[in-house]
Image (cartoon, helix red, strand yellow):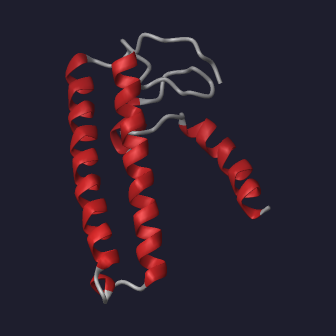
Amino acid sequence: MSTAVHDATHLPAKLSELLRSMLEEEFAAQTVRLTQLTVYARLPRRGGYDPRTLRALTASTRQRIADTAHALRRMSEGTYGICVSCDKPIPLGRLRAVPHAAHCALCERTAEPAAREVLSV
């Protein structure tokens, strides 16, 4: 992983604004969702969720918040849209589909088997 700062000028200004807006909306929505799940966890019937499902949903929501916050931080640093593994631009189609993407699709696929091995140990 490189510590070099890149200028992410490969993104047109309007697209960059749209992606920032999408990330901010996602952050707000996931924050509301985490609040709901926290309330459900304190209710006697846990909002209809079994404890295991509620823990999984809470963990997933926290991860989405963290990923979105990290993407917003990369935007402010000027490194958004640059793969953190190979330092190449992340294709616009991927950013539109996954605005919080930190890796290009190739690096993401390469990292997934290694992550699965670590989790299975």
Vertically, is 97 above or below 55?
above
Residue at image point 70% right, 57% down: 116
Q: Quadrant of the N terminus?
A: top right
Vertically, is 32 above or below 67?
below
Give the quarter of the image for residue 46.
Answer: bottom left
- Residue 61 placed where, x, y %? 38, 58
- Left or right relative to 107: residue 91: left
Foreground: 106 or 6?
6
- Residue 43 placed where, x, y %? 28, 82
Give the quarter of the image for residue 110.
Answer: top right
Residue at image point 25% right, 31% down: 20
Vertically, is 60 above or below 48?
above
- Left or right relative to 4: residue 26: left
Please give the count of numbered marks on the rendered protein: 0
- Residue 107 placed where, x, y %? 62, 36
Give the quarter of the image for residue 40.
Answer: bottom left
Foreground: 16 or 77?
77
Q: Residue furthest right?
A: 121
Residue at image point 56% right, 27% down: 84
- Residue 69 placed where, x, y %? 37, 38
- Left or right relative to 28: residue 41: right
